[in-house]
Image (cartoon, grey):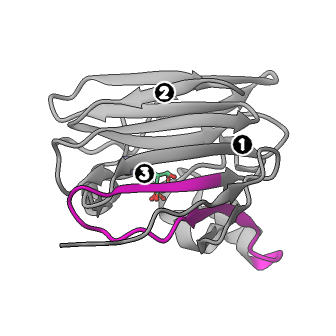
């Protein structure tokens, strides 16, 4: 029997710092393949390779019955006209859901179902977005401040990045006349 003891982590509701936690960082060079404007990505990499996002995971076993949880901080910025975003994934265990609770900033949560439907939900302080089973998910910071959110998911859900890397999302989020707008992804590949 697993006799793990209960524990707290402490989350700074403004910065998203989660302590104690395990941090993963992604720079432009880690996510350049996701953006349409490769030249703009290379230029950013040459000029210091800025941080795009950080994820800080609470230390929970990746086993059935546990709840993985983490904060994500996406910095404001763009590659060309596309806003900074997360890699995006679907769960290896496709039939698992997730909740994103937004603490700070302004975002779009892009989702695509295995049937090919897509949805985009607004994220704002206090929004709690439910990602049902069978939907891949990617988050975009469409504001001028860091986008900070807290996530809870079955700890054994797993991250499948390959499908999204191969196909891309149906929509991308770009700035047009100071507004964040969704447009068709010109690089979208058929399923
Ligand atoms: C959320 C959760 C995490 C995920 C993170 C970054 O915090 O869904 O499981 O790792 O976003 O997203 P990605 O793994 O797609 O880069
Ligand atoms: Zn997930």
Q: Position of residue 67 (x, y in %)?
A: 36, 53
Q: Which residue is mark 3?
A: 88
Residue at 58% of width from left, 45% of height from top? 150
Who comes first in sequence, dot 1 or dot 3?
3
In the depicted structure, whether residue 152 falls above or below residue 116: below
Q: Position of residue 81 (x, y in %)?
A: 69, 41
Quarter of the image with the C terminus is top left
Where disc 1 sits, the SS reads strand
Q: Quick check: marks 2 and 3 in contact, CB under 8 Å?
A: no
- Front disc: 2 or 3: 2
Residue at 17% of width from left, 53% of height from top? 93
- Towards the viewer: 170 or 61: 61
- Front disc: 1 or 3: 1
Q: Which residue is mark 2?
A: 129
Q: Which residues are magenta?
A: 46-72
Q: Which residue is mark 1?
A: 147
Quarter of the image with the N terminus is bottom left
In the depicted structure, whether residue 45 falls above or below residue 167: below
Q: Position of residue 120 (x, y in %)?
A: 47, 23
Residue at 39% of width from left, 41% of height from top? 137
Structural distance between the alpha carbons of marks 2 and 3 = 15 Å
Where disc 2 sits, the SS reads strand
Structural distance between the alpha carbons of marks 2 and 1 = 14 Å
Q: Position of residue 170 (x, y in %)?
A: 36, 34
Q: Quick check: marks 1 and 3 in contact, CB under 8 Å?
A: no
- Front disc: 2 or 1: 2
Mark 3 Cβ and ligand 1 under 8 Å apart: yes
Q: Give left or right: position of 136 versus 46.
A: left
Structural distance between the alpha carbons of marks 1 and 3 = 15 Å
- Towards the viewer: 44 or 58: 58
């Amino acid at each position: 029997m697993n006799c793990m003891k209960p524990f707290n982590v402490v989350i700074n509701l403004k910065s998203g710092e989660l302590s104690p936690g395990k941090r993963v960082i992604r720079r432009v060079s880690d996510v350049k393949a996701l953006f349409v404007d490769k030249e703009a990505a290379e230029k950013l990499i040459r000029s210091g390779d800025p941080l795009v996002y950080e994820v800080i995971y609470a230390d929970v076993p990746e086993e059935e019955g546990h709840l993985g949880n983490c904060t994500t901080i996406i910095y404001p910025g763009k590659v060309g006209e596309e806003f900074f975003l997360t890699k995006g994934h679907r769960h290896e265990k496709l039939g698992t859901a997730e909740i994103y609770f937004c603490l700070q900033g302004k975002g779009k949560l892009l989702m695509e179902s295995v049937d090919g439907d897509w949805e985009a939900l607004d994220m704002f302080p206090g929004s709690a977005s439910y990602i049902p089973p069978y939907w891949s998910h990617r988050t975009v910071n469409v504001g001028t401040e860091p986008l900070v959110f807290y996530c809870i998911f079955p700890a054994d859900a797993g991250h499948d990045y390959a499908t999204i890397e191969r196909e891309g999302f149906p929509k991308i989020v770009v700035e047009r006349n100071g507004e964040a707008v969704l447009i068709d992804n010109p690089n979208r590949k058929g399923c």
